[in-house]
Image (spheres, rainbow, N blue to C red):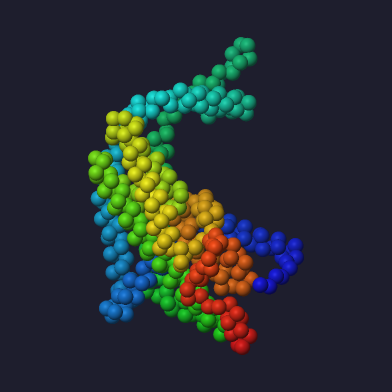
Amino acid sequence: MRHSRIDTRTACLLLLSVLAVFYTLYFASAIILPMILALVVNLLLSTPLRFLHTRLRLPKPLAALCLILCVFGIVGAVGTAISVPATGWLERAPEAINTLQERLAFLRGPFQLLTSASDRIHNFMTIAGGHVDHPAAVTDTADGHVIVVSTPSTGGLDRFSSSILLGTQAFMGQFFTMILMLFFLLAQGDSLLRRFVEIMPTFADKRRTVQIAYQIERNVSQYLATITIINSLVGLVNMAQCWLLGMPNPLLWGVMAFLLNYIPIIGPMMGIIIYFLVGLFVYPSAWQALLPPAIYLCIHLTEGETITPMVLARRFTLNPVLVMASLMFWDWLWGIFGAFLSVPLLAVFKIICDHVEILTPIGHIVGGPARTTPPKPLFTDAPDPPDDRQAGQDD
């Protein structure tokens, strides 16, 4: 492993370049995020596309169109099936809140103390800062005290409706961008890679570029396909346990468990909380409401500690600390979609580091924890670095 010294000027330029990239990713997320999502879905659909094109002799544009219609037809059918019960739960939200307050009455005292302290701190900061949300509600008394009277806002509902409308319009625009980008990636992605390889200056660079593209497609697509199958089984098992325990709308909670399982650590924690709250609304006592989240936790522990490591450990090993850091970073940068993309993006970063000599130490850090027995290579088809360097010298 070669070490090269970096002077202060180069280090500062590198830091500024990284910050500029993150700045661009944050403020241009409306156009960059749909493209990244399209790239990830393209990796997931690359194997079915190859089957339709090579085995069934379908033209690539037609095969891409069939795949997109099939996938999003299934997503639309499931979304339509769960939209009615989800709307029903939203309409019953006021009743559910009252029921939860009754079941969690033993926590009312601590919550009231926290609320009272928060209100006092807010009023103190408001008076000390010299401004309030509604200036007309401030009156001065004769002894110099300030009385703050809160008045209801009349435009809150209108602002809420406007924000929902604007958010829906933005989501539909990004969704259309992703679909359009996905179609062209499936139909013409190989030609783009071929042109990119052609501009590489040496044969070693061309071969390395092809190897990186192949490793990214093979490993990330297999990871996404495996995780999708495992998450589907988790959703089916949770749907079965909701049906057996008498919880209403088991399909809704099964789909929710399927989606949340894509988000490491935080997703299952949110699922446990949601199952507990739904159990409080359905069952007569808080102790009975603990049964669905307890079974959910057992399912997650079985899947996360046994099944997933057994299936993916030989092929896909990442450092858990960096997985969590990647999850928090991309969630902060892009929200819920960033949380879904955190692990695939970290995997792509490791593959690139493993094939670029100067980034090899970083790839070693991103890898999984050390084992007592000699592990198999993370990527079974990865070339041996000495051979690759020798090829570059021969070229």
Seen in the picture, residue 264 relative to 372 is either above or below; the reply is: above
Q: Residue furthest bottom?
A: 394
Q: Position of residue 333 (x, y in %)?
A: 52, 52
Instruction: Check the image and report above or below for 196 versus 170.
Output: below
In the rendered image, is residue 260 in sight?
A: no
Q: In this image, 239 relative to 294: left or right?
A: left
On screen, residue 305 versus residue 142, left or right, reads left
- Tell me the residue at 24%/44% (across/down): 244
- Residue placed at 66% from the left, 59% from the top? 16
Residue at image coords 56%, 18%:
147
In this view, the residue in front, 27 or 67, is 67
Q: Which of 91 and 105 lies nearest the eye of the viewer?
A: 105
The number of numbered discs placed on residues in the rendered structure image is: 0
Q: Quadrant of the N terminus?
A: bottom right
Residue 107, image x, y percentages: 43, 26
- Residue at image point 62% right, 60% down: 18
